[in-house]
Amino acid sequence: MASLEAQVAHIWRRLGFGPTRKDINAGKGMGTAALVDSLFRRPRVDFAAAGFPPASAGEDAHAGRQLELMAFGPTATGSGTLSPAYNPFQERVTWILQGLVVVGIADSVYVADLRDHVKHLRGALGATYRSLLRTVVTRPGMVKYLTADRNTKDHPNQNLGRELLELFSLGRVDPKTGAANYTQQDVIEVSRALSGWRYDWGDGSTWFDPSQWDGGNKTFLGAPRGAAGLDEVMAAIVAHPSWRRHVPARLYKELTGLDATPAVLDALAPSWGADGNLKRLLKAIVKRPEFLSDQCLLNKTKTPVERVVAAARLLGWPGLATDVNLPWLMTRMAQDPWSPPNVSGWPKGDQWLNTTNLHSWSDVANLMALRGFRWDGAATGPVNPMVTKVHTRATPATAAAFVCKQAGLTPVSPRTLDTLHDYATAGSWTPARAAGLLNLVLLSPEFLAN
């Protein structure tokens, strides 16, 4: 069974974006159950307090601010220091939802639209998934992203109806039975019910236009629904058997890295409830024995966003919202936080482990770890706090184990330790070598695992 330290680091990776040494020490002192409870109890940071810039600041500034919130909380932009209001669990859930209820900046979807979408996702832990869906499918971001404003009684558009069923609520097939959850006719009928929502290009708001709504009788998801609209669609969705399984299975996979069995889904159903209690479900998942089992630890791959945020937390790197190179590098790694590739979200799991992506990550890791150094090792400006800590508190002989401990990497393979030790002892012990050692840590298999 994994050590307490390994379990604490695991909790911080799955309920946040990675631990600092201080986090691990505190977690070991309180125990895993108390650590989980403490993360769930942290006060939520509302959108106004999150410190997002105005919409006029552009996509890069907003994506960078979200990365800062993931790493440090609502601290001063560019500080690289931890905020007392840091809520890693809220940031993790928001990020999960951005890959589940997907809206991205594309075509006519503007920064203001995605700001509004993220605002509602940030409040999801205080609501139900049913109410979240009911809200976001009528907000400007989703209406424009899935062209729902073009869905009228005379010119039906199926984009929103299809994705609401397939991606956001039920899935194509029931995770327990394997039965198809809906038909093409269901998509057509649900789309008819969702018609009439319009976007005001003058003030950026959405509104319901009864004159463009198809008020005829409809039959979908196995029953006649009369002159159904959005509320009747939501009622039919939450009454469907797969409502209790599709999203819980997605969230279970996110937190454990495991596929939910039918027995697990049945056990989680009461926590999800009739309306989709997100916080209660997530806590039920984390309280299950497999969450801290050896099969769950380090069984996932960090996405590019997770790598960048975990590295920033380790290094105390202040450039998440200020370094002009980072947005371009995030695009090279194929995970621009506010521009998902499509409505299905980003690639999953080991799809991130390819030569091109890892080569791009090596450039990012080098940029972050070697802050303040020239190519020849000469200091040209402020360096990361962790570089100074490693240089002053470790020796070439102890540095390999020291940096792994600071990063919460446990267990570490002998091959990784030997590689780090060889580098630390290959030359003079200087701040630049300490920075280079941290750079190697960011490229290690243990750091890339989640």
Image (cartoon, rainbow, N blue to C red):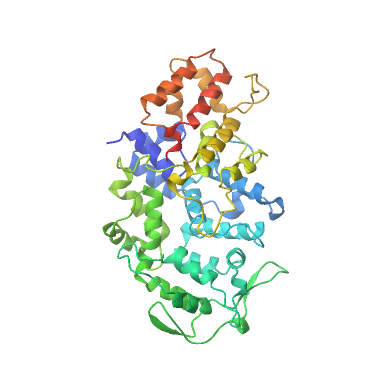
Residue 60 located left or right of residue 421:
right
The residue positioned 59% from the left and 43% from the top of the image is 332
Q: Residue 422: which quarter of the image?
A: top left
Q: Position of residue 48 (x, y in %)?
A: 61, 54
The image quarter in which residue 109 lies: bottom right
Of 413 and 205, nearer the camera is 413
Residue 177 location in percent, x, y? Answer: 30, 65
In the picture as drawn, the residue positioned furthest to the front comes out as: 355
Residue name at image x 57 percent, y 56 percent: 118
Residue 76 in view of the camera: no
Q: Position of residue 277 (x, y in %)?
A: 40, 62
In the depicted view, which residue is nearer to us: 267 or 142?
142
Q: Is 14 positioned to the left or the right of 264 in the image?
A: right
Residue at image point 47% right, 34% down: 20
On-image quarter of the N terminus: top left
Q: Nearer the viewer, residue 13 or 4?
A: 13
Percent across and percent down for residue 5 are: 36, 33
418 lies above or below 147: above
Q: Is residue 220 visible?
A: yes
Tally of numbered discs: 0
x 42%, y 38%: residue: 449
Q: State the quadrant of the C terminus.
A: top left
In the picture shown, does residue 18 fall above or below 181?
A: above
